[in-house]
Image (tube, rainbow, N blue to C red):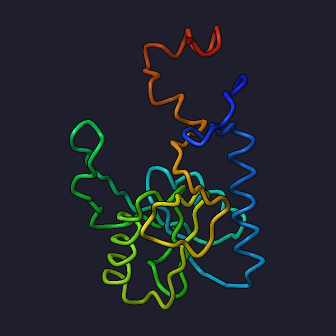
């Protein structure tokens, strides 16, 4: 990725190197807490990369739970939260001490509802702790582990968002010339 714009109170720009460094900081913070967990569940899509890396570092099974919040009024209102009925996990089921991972906690609504859902759906969970890279200041939820608290609630521009506007028919030109503007 080329140069990224400077971050402001309204926009936080994150490069791939910064992104991976933040995930490593989160992994280290959990380790330094001394808490032992047996499974990780990440929230798709934002938490998938974070959960995958932590699952590899800790060598524990990774579960994926899909959630989506439909946006109303051109993105200004959070709509109905849809939580998938099942999780996909590499081994077993969610039980024992579990670490729930996402990239950020924004308003906290999804975080709170998913936490309640997991505790109800998986009675074998003995303890559920939460970890994120970014914790926004206006959040109603408090993660157990976080790397950056963002009191000004900026929009976070993550490096993989470049793929949000790339379509298959554009790939050849994208790869040949670099990223079109």
Q: Position of residue 16 (x, y in %)?
A: 69, 38
State the count of labels: 0
Q: Is residue 93 above or below residue 13?
A: below
Eyeballing the image, is 150 above or below 141?
A: above
Residue depicted at x 58% and y 60%? 51
Provide residue 110's location: percent of width, then percent of height: 36, 63
Q: To which quarter of the image does residue 158 belong?
A: top right
Q: Can you give x and y, in whole percent of width and height, for residue 87 in the image? A: 38, 66
Indicate the position of residue 41 as horizontal and vertical percent values.
49, 68
Name the residue nearer the viewer: 82 or 39.
82
**Above or below for 176 versus 75:** above
Q: Is residue 115 above or below residue 134?
A: below
Of residue 95 and residue 144, the one placed in the foreground of this image is 144
Task: Return the residue nearer the eye: 164 or 84.
Answer: 164
**Residue drawn at 52 percent across, 16 percent down:** 171
Along the viewing direction, whichever of 83 and 138 lies nearer the viewer: 138
- What is the quadrant of the N terminus in the image? top right
Q: Seen in the image, is 157 located left or right of residue 65? A: right
Which residue is found at the position 55% from the left and 75% from the top?
99
């Amino acid at each position: 990725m080329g140069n990224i714009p400077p971050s402001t109170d309204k926009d936080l720009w994150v490069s791939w190197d910064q992104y991976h460094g933040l995930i490593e900081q989160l992994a280290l913070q959990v380790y330094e807490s001394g808490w032992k967990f047996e499974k990780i569940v990440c929230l798709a899509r934002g938490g998938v990369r974070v959960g995958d890396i932590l699952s590899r570092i800790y060598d524990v099974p990774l579960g994926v739970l899909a959630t989506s919040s439909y946006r109303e009024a051109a993105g200004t209102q959070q709509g109905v939260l849809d939580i998938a009925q099942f999780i996909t996990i590499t081994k077993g089921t969610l039980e024992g001490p579990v670490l729930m991972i996402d990239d950020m906690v924004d308003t906290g609504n999804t975080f709170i509802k998913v936490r309640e859902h997991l505790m109800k759906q998986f009675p074998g969970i003995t303890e559920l702790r939460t970890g994120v890279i970014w914790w926004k200041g206006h959040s109603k939820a408090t993660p157990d582990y976080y790397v950056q608290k963002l009191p000004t609630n900026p929009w976070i521009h993550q490096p993989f968002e470049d793929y949000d506007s790339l379509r298959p028919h554009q790939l050849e030109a994208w790869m040949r010339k670099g990223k079109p503007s």
